[in-house]
Image (spheres, rainbow, N blue to C red):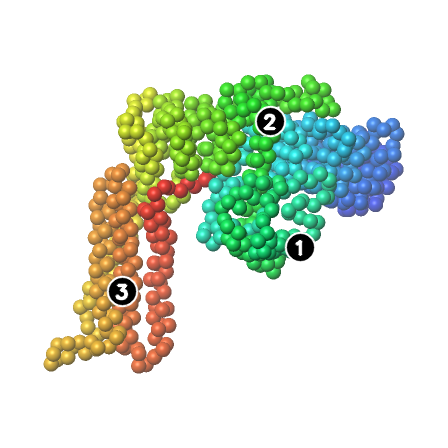
Amino acid sequence: MDQRESTNKKVLFSCAMKGEWGRVIEMYKEDSTFHKARITRSGHTALHIAVSDGKEDVVRQMVDVIKPQQPQEEPIKALRTHNNRNNTALHLAASMGNATMCHIIASVERTLVDDRNADGETPLFLAALHGRKQAFLCLHSIRNPPNTDSPFYVNCRRNDGDTILHSAINGDHFDLALQIIHLYKDLANWVNEKGLSPLHLLASKPCAFKSGSRLGRMETIIYHCMYVEELQPQTLPGAAKHGDSHGYPDNYNTSWNVFKLIRKAVDVVLGKPCEANAEDPEAGAQASSLFPANYRTCCHLIKFFYLVLLIILGKGSDQLRKIYRKKEIHTRSAQIVKQLLHYASSYEYEDDGSHPEEGYSTTLSQDATPATSVKPTTTSTEDKKDEQNPKRGAITETAILVAAKNGVMEIIEKILELFPVAIHDLNEDKKNIVLLAVEHRQPHVYQFLLKKNIYKESLFHQVDKHGNSVLHLAATLRDYKPWLIPGEALQMQWELKWYKFVNEPMPPDFFGRYNLNNETPDDIFSRTHKDLVKSAAEWLNKTSESCSVVAALIATVAFATAATVPGGVKQETGHPTLEYEPGFQLFAISSLVALGFSITAVVMFLSIMTSRFQEQNFNKDLPRKLLVGLTSLFISIASMLVSFCAGHFFVLKDQLHYVALPIYLVTCLPVTLFVLAQFPLYFDLLWATFKHVPQRSYRTS
């Protein structure tokens, strides 16, 4: 590089950094070598920088300067100039989601959409990876003109085998994923180098489904009142998403939803039949069968008032937005599952991607055989086969097994509805859906399978390759805490409840059955829960010690208070001077209650601290003692405060009159804060004690 060229590049760099784009365009017109000049350490050209700055007009002018050159290959080479990561300017525009700049650049030559960076990602792939829907649709329409018989699949995969559909689902861009399924139907069955299909990825996202999400009571009410329509395919760049946007701001869309709800409610009131959703007739039939017309009217009215609230708040507060977003994700993910299984159902249920070199598969079942190849596109059949099936590993679990591990009931129910034979799938350890559900503590899945009595004998009595039955796996504690409850003692209680719950439908001979390591379920339970029992005992000891100190203090004060009579006694009769005052009666009763319950609390906490802490003690004995102790402690604290205020009221009632009550409230505040701090533990203890089936905390497997 000569000195003059180096100086010119520095000038070009300086102008681009300062935003002097008029000068940059002049330099582009004067010397075509600047079109491919890489002027930054990362290898960016001036066009890269203009795209990164979002200068649409500048990018248009720069591309217009590049296009007229002859021969035709030169402008394409200039636009294909890449940085150190092999990203062209079109890659950057796609990552940013700027559909206008994507159209300006890609319309010069549609094969620019196929350029790959260092990771093998095309601009189309990057648009899907970052959830840039409009940029994706723009690039798709340029690469696949309307007269194209079949979409161009070669640019849909990167080096690790992930497709654009994998990336959209991984990033929770479900609206884009639905669009991809509509445009690239064959991708529903493609697997990556690990053998994972899009359905596998969805099955690994329990929080994307309602069955894997936990909502409070108020959140649940709001959740069910929210109105989220299913998306419809969008075919043109810039077109509005049906049910989500009509090309207007959010409050206009909400108004549109209000209008539709009012119309539905009025139709029901007038006795007109509700029309089922044309895209989902099952949903309409189900709604009609579940509730009578007047109940559906109430639901529509609730939705109506909720949407009015959204209009006033501009789509609602932050909490409402979160709940709305959650329901939107749940609706979209369920819709994606239906679409994926719809296209998978056109193939026989026989291939799970465990032999990807033989073709892409439906990814649903074990015992794979070669799958059908897809239709050829503009590339040769051999090229497309190589693009579909790079060298990659094999997945050892089908999608329904992954869903069973993660508790995704929506996927399990839909697969069994379309492919009942999937209930017999096994992984490499010979674990079926029941064994995996029990091993990963999925109560909803286990209860669902229990209801299917037709499979009870064949599924529930199977063992894995190590000879473990469902009881062996229920007794095995894994490394992470599976239950949605705090405290080691409550975790241990729910482990015992889960073990008992799984044991109930099993025949008696299963309880003493040995596995290949010559262990019974009880042996495994004792071995794997040894550390949890130790930590649970320590937790109970610390909790009981701290609470017993408070209970003993209250008992001491209550005893002294009960032996003291406010106002003294009458010398003649020995009766209390204030015995006929209402406050005196309240004082006497509350002090006695405080004494009795504080002693009860002390006894309960002492009995916990002197316990042997055996495994079975954590099921009912210890939790109930802790529950009685905390209940007694709370009652004694409340009674002590009442007795204190009632006894002291005689001193201040004449001087302070009505001011006395606020003073007592402020005085009792510190003790009240202690009680409130213990309430979460108390409610968790109540929940864990009286709930028959434990509740799972969801984490992807």
In which quadrant of the rendered image does the N terminus lie? Answer: top right
Residue linked to disc 3 = 640
Q: Quadrant of residue 653?
A: bottom left
Q: What amino acid is labelled 3 in the image?
A: Met
Q: What amino acid is labelled 1 in the image?
A: Tyr
Q: Is residue 138 visible?
A: yes
From this view, report whether residue 428 is shown above or below residue 79.
above
Q: Which mark sits nearer the N-terminus, 3 or 2?
A: 2
**Dot 1 surroundings within 10 Å: few (below 14), some, or many (20 or more)?**
some
Image spot of residue 24 (x, y percent): 82, 42
Residue linked to disc 1 = 252
Q: Nearer the viewer, residue 629 or 673?
A: 629
**Dot 2 surroundings within 10 Å: few (below 14), some, or many (20 or more)?**
few
From this view, report whether residue 205 is shown above or below residue 229.
above
Q: Quadrant of residue 647?
A: bottom left
Q: Which mark sits nearer the N-terminus, 3 or 1?
A: 1
